[in-house]
Image (cartoon, helix red, strand yellow):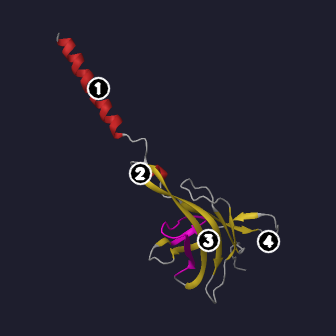
Amino acid sequence: MKNLVRIFLLLIIVGAAIGIHSSCSDENDCSMAGRPMMYCTFKTNDPDNDNAVLNDTLDSLTVRAMGTDSIILNNEKDVHTVMLPLRYTSDSTVFIFQYDPVRNPEDVDTVYIVQENTPYFQSMECGYMMKQNIISAAFGNRKNSTEKITSIELRNKEANSNEIENLQIFFNYRDRTPVTPD
């Protein structure tokens, strides 16, 4: 009889542990979906071969979103990719790229993104999420500023959280051969 009571108590404890574990685990993890971002890679054209595209790395980059006081990237060094959030409340987003904000604050390019925002119901736990499709991308600069961006190529229209490339941003070719003293 004592063994039967022990087995019964053990079954109750194991059953309660399994019940608590399964009720705490959520199959619909809202953080997995995350906020979709626009994933950009930096490229340059090879001056020796017109058909060759080279990966590019910017020495220093600060990215701000126009219309907000948010700094998305603050004087980051050796940047070759960047993930940028698109606005939920507007059908366009404007980013300001500053290449050397300390020594040359006027050396900027502006990237204009037009996107389509579509809300959709994810689940009861997560609520509504936003699907964002990039319609077009353009660039420009301030008056009397040297333009570093030469072109933008749209590779994938859907902003995502999987680091799938959306834009290739092409910059002027810069010789990266270190200067050696004679």
Residue shown at 51%/75% (left/top)? 64
In the rendered structure, which disc, 2 or 1, sits on the residue that comes first in sequence? 1
Which residue is the site of mark 3?
58
| Along the line of sight, the residue nearer the viewer: 2 or 100 | 2
Real-space Cα separation, disc 3 to disc 4, in angstroms: 18 Å
Residue at mark 1: 14
Task: Give the Cα separation between the discs numbered 2 and 4.
Answer: 49 Å
- Lower position in the chain sequence, tag 3 or tag 1: 1
- Residue type (three-letter) at the residue carrying disc 1: Val
Mark 2 and mark 1 in contact? Answer it, CB < 8 Å.
no
In the picture of the structure, the residue carrying the numbered disc 2 is 126
Mark 2: give few (<14), some (14-19) or many (20+) Cα within 10 Å.
Answer: few
Instruction: Name the image quarter holding the C terminus.
Output: bottom right
Q: Are marks 3 and 4 in contact (CB under 8 Å)?
A: no
Tell me the distance, in whole angstroms, between the alpha carbons under discs 1 and 4. 69 Å
Callout 2–callout 4 Cβ contact below 8 Å: no
**At label 4, which amino acid type do we have?**
Pro
Is 121 left or right of 40, judged from the image as shown?
left
- Residue 87 on the magenta segment: yes
Which residue was labeled with disc 4? 47
Which picture quadrant has residue 9?
A: top left
Q: In the visual, does 100 lie left or right of 22? A: right
Specify the principal SS of the magenta part. Answer: strand
